[in-house]
Image: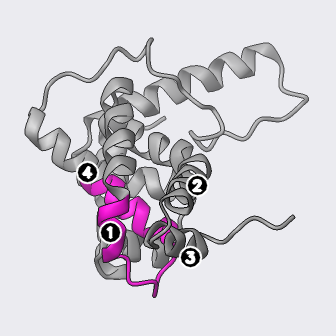
């Protein structure tokens, strides 16, 4: 059986039938909550704060989804809402210290370090350390630069998708990515 499209689920979410609305919200949550959490986690650097953002996004979704025009992918609209909510939360809380990196799950694939079955344990350890260093450096970037880097390199969005999600031009996306690269290079050094 084919999964319902996001567009159909949103239509059900906006409909009059309470049962269909609940089922649509549950389906959208199941489909998108992990990626919403991952984006929020990498923007905020705090698991509890990221979980709060997920809850806020999906609790307000039935009311806010009316602003989705349908001319872009629902997932792009949801990313934009997540990034905006995470950045707003970060601003409200100020630049307090992020959660301990020991507590922060570092996903090696998300750090753009593809695993290979023939990798020995030493190389795997080096990759894990590199991933931790990259995560630390990402947490030191401004929320806007962190968001563009996370969405590009962790979530794999294209420049066009980034422009759509961040509601800016492709030139602005490229500029922010360039500034993020420079900041990361300054933080990580020549390695």
The image position of residue 179, as x and y in percent, is 28, 58
x, y percent for residue 28? 55, 56
Q: Is residue 65 magenta?
A: yes
Say what secondary structure mark 2 lies in: helix
Q: Residues within 10 Å of mark 1 (few under 14, many from 20)?
A: many
Task: Give the labeled residue for mark 3.
Answer: 7
Real-space CA distance between mark 4 and mark 1, rounded to the nearest whole angstrom: 12 Å
* Nearer-N-terminus badge (4/1): 4
> On the picture, is 130 further left or further right than 67?
right
Disc 3 packing (10 Å; few <14; some 14–19; many ≥20) = few
In the rendered image, which residue does mark 2 sit on? 23
The residue beneath circle 1 is 166
Which span of residues is magenta-colored? 62-84
Per the model, the C-alpha gap separating discs 3 and 1 is 21 Å
**Mark 3 or mark 1, which has the lower sequence index?**
3
> How many residues crowd mark 4 within 10 Å: few (<14), some (14–19), many (20+)?
some
Distance between the alpha carbons at the discs numbered 1 and 2: 29 Å
Q: Among all residues in the image, which is located at the extreme right?
A: 118
- Is residue 187 visible in the rendered structure shown here? no
Q: Which residue is at the front of the view, 126 or 58?
A: 58
């Amino acid at each position: 059986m084919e999964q319902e499209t996001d567009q159909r689920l949103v239509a059900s979410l906006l409909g009059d039938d309470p049962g269909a609305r609940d089922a649509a919200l549950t389906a959208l949550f199941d489909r998108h909550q992990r990626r919403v959490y991952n984006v929020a986690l990498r923007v905020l650097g705090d698991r509890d704060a990221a979980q709060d953002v997920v809850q806020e996004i999906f609790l307000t979704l039935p009311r806010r989804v009316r602003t989705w025009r349908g001319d872009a992918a629902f997932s792009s609209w949801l990313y934009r809402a997540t990034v905006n909510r995470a950045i707003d939360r970060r601003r409200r809380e100020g630049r307090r210290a992020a959660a301990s990196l020991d507590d922060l799950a570092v996903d090696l694939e998300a750090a753009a370090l593809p695993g290979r079955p023939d990798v020995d344990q030493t190389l795997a350890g080096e990759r894990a350390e590199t991933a931790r260093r990259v995560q630390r450096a990402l947490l030191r970037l401004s929320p806007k630069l962190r968001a563009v880097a996370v969405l590009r390199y962790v979530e794999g969005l294209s420049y066009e998708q980034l422009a759509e999600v961040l509601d800016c031009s492709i030139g602005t996306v490229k500029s922010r990515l360039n500034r993020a690269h420079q900041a990361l290079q300054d933080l990580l050094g020549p390695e």
